[in-house]
Image (tube, rainbow, N blue to C red):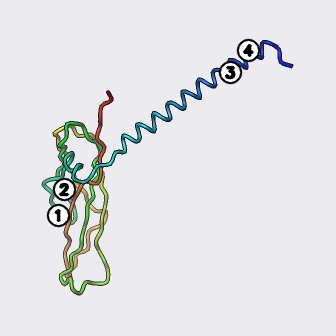
Amino acid sequence: MMNARWERRLAQFNRAWVVVSVLAAFLAVDGVRRAAVAATLASPDQAAQVVSVRAVTVKDGAVSGQIVNNSSRTIRDVQLQIRYTWLWKNEMRPGEDSVSDTVYYTVEGDMPPGGNKPFTYKPSSPLPSRPDGRYEVTVSVAGFAELIPQK
């Protein structure tokens, strides 16, 4: 049989455990709520209103340009989709192998409202030089984080 001292300690432990459990549950729910807000999706048109790409140049497969923050908030870690689309000289009789490629490149760091940031992506291996076609290179914004101050 327990004595009174052990019963009091067990009761204190149980109260502390309840407080910790409630606090942990609150933090978990709050974390899920914040994560859900952080993962808000935008249509390509909405995203283009926030961040855009301009002055794109391509030389030997390397792609350079500028990212522009069109919003009134800081944005971070802009992910670019760079598409190397192979266009055959004779599209009616294309070759057997497809040399088109898509890469995702992240321009890390913060960009203030109205600011811009240069970027350069260089493929790890040179693009094949072939007489039966050419590459068309396009760059678009695939994602970014927009920093929204807490109220």
Residue drawn 20% across the image and 65% down it: 137
The residue singled out by tag 2 in the image is 64
Q: Residue 19, how many percent across, how many down?
A: 59, 23
Please tell me whether mark 2 sits on a helix, a strand or a loop: strand
Q: Amino acid at mark 4?
A: Arg
Q: Amino acid at mark 1?
A: Lys
Please tell me whether mark 1 sits on a helix, a strand or a loop: strand
Q: Is residue 108 above or below residue 133?
A: above
Between marks 4 and 2, how big is the CA–CA gap? 70 Å
Between marks 3 and 4, how big is the CA–CA gap? 9 Å
- Residue 8: mark in rendering: 4
Tell whether 10 sits left or right of 151. Answer: right
Mark 1 or mark 4: whose residue is earlier in sequence: 4
Tell whether 143 sits left or right of 22. Answer: left
Closer to the camera: disc 2 or disc 3?
3
The residue singled out by tag 3 in the image is 13
Residue 26 or 5: which is nearer the viewer?
Answer: 26
Tags 1 and 4 in contact by the CB under 8 Å rule?
A: no
Quarter-wise, where is residue 81 in the image?
bottom left
Q: Residue 56, how many percent across, how many down?
A: 15, 57
